[in-house]
Amino acid sequence: MMKWIPVTLALLLSACSSTSDTTYYQLPAGQQVAPRSESSAITVGNARPILWIEHVSVPDYLAGNGVVYQTNDVQYVIAANNLWASPLDQQLQQNLVTNLSSALPGWLISATPPTQPHDTLNVNVTGFHGRYDGKVIVSGEWTLEHNDQLTKQPFLVTLPQDADGYDAMVRTLAKGWQQEAQQMANALSRLN
């Protein structure tokens, strides 16, 4: 009977120490667009370029709830307690609308299909994770349909984290996404 006491005590202690809090992450909003006054509201007569962000896709390993961390050249860990507050593809799309709207003030940027003639942007994100060397990776490619012509552009942004931890990793990922949005805006501004 006495030999079970240490085992029972060890099980109780391990059960108490294994409780961990779940943390949820949302990408910071990026550059906010100033609200428009009534006089600058968009009307059909305004000849503004219109961009529809049709889809931002992520691979299966990024599509789950867990924030992803690459532990070596071939292994990835999907966090169990550090989760995205909403689906990552939705966060990336909404963040892209905000960043492009800020970078292209003369454009109408929309996540819903417009009824007027428009350009269409699709983004395939292949990497959006932290890495074992203290850097984050934002990679993929975007495709733009403009005047019935397709432009395809790969991207790879690698940034060092300012600090350790998931908070710093998510902030740095958002910074990388914002930098890529600026590259997209530069390419779009050359079209019109």
Image (tube, rainbow, N blue to C red):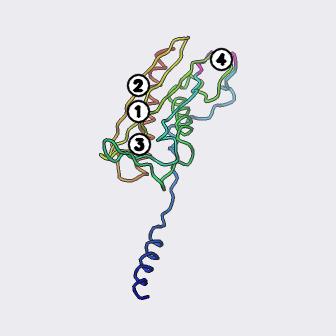
Say few, some or many: other residues with alpha carbon within 10 Å of mark 3 (under 14 / 14 to 19 / 20 or more).
Answer: many
> Label 1 to label 2, Cα distance in Å?
8 Å
Compare marks 4 and 2 and give the one earlier in the sequence. 4
Q: Amino acid at mark 1?
A: Ser
Q: Is residue 46 magenta?
A: yes
Residue placed under numbered mark 1 in the picture:
139
Q: Check residue 129 in the rendering and tell me which mark sits there, or answer none.
A: 3
Residue placed under numbered mark 4 in the picture:
46
> Label 1 to label 4, Cα distance in Å?
35 Å
Tell me: 75 left or right of 178.
Answer: left
Mark 1 or 4: in front is: 1
Compare marks 4 and 3 and give the one earlier in the sequence. 4
Say few, some or many: other residues with alpha carbon within 10 Å of mark 4 (under 14 / 14 to 19 / 20 or more).
Answer: few
Residue placed under numbered mark 2 in the picture:
154
Compare marks 3 and 1 and give the one earlier in the sequence. 3
Q: Residue at x 46, y 47 (%)?
A: 67
The magenta-colored residue range is 44-50
Judging depth in this view, the residue of 164 and 3 nearest the camera is 3
Give the vertical position of 129 relative to 117 (above or below).
Answer: below
Q: List the single residue furthest toward the front.
A: 1
Q: Where is residue 124 drawn, in percent x and y? A: 48, 29
> Label 3 to label 2, Cα distance in Å?
17 Å
SS class of the residue under badge 3? strand
SS class of the residue under badge 1? strand
Q: Amino acid at mark 2?
A: Pro
Image quarter of residue 157: top left
> Label 3 to label 1, Cα distance in Å?
9 Å
Q: Residue at x 55, y 11 (%)?
A: 148
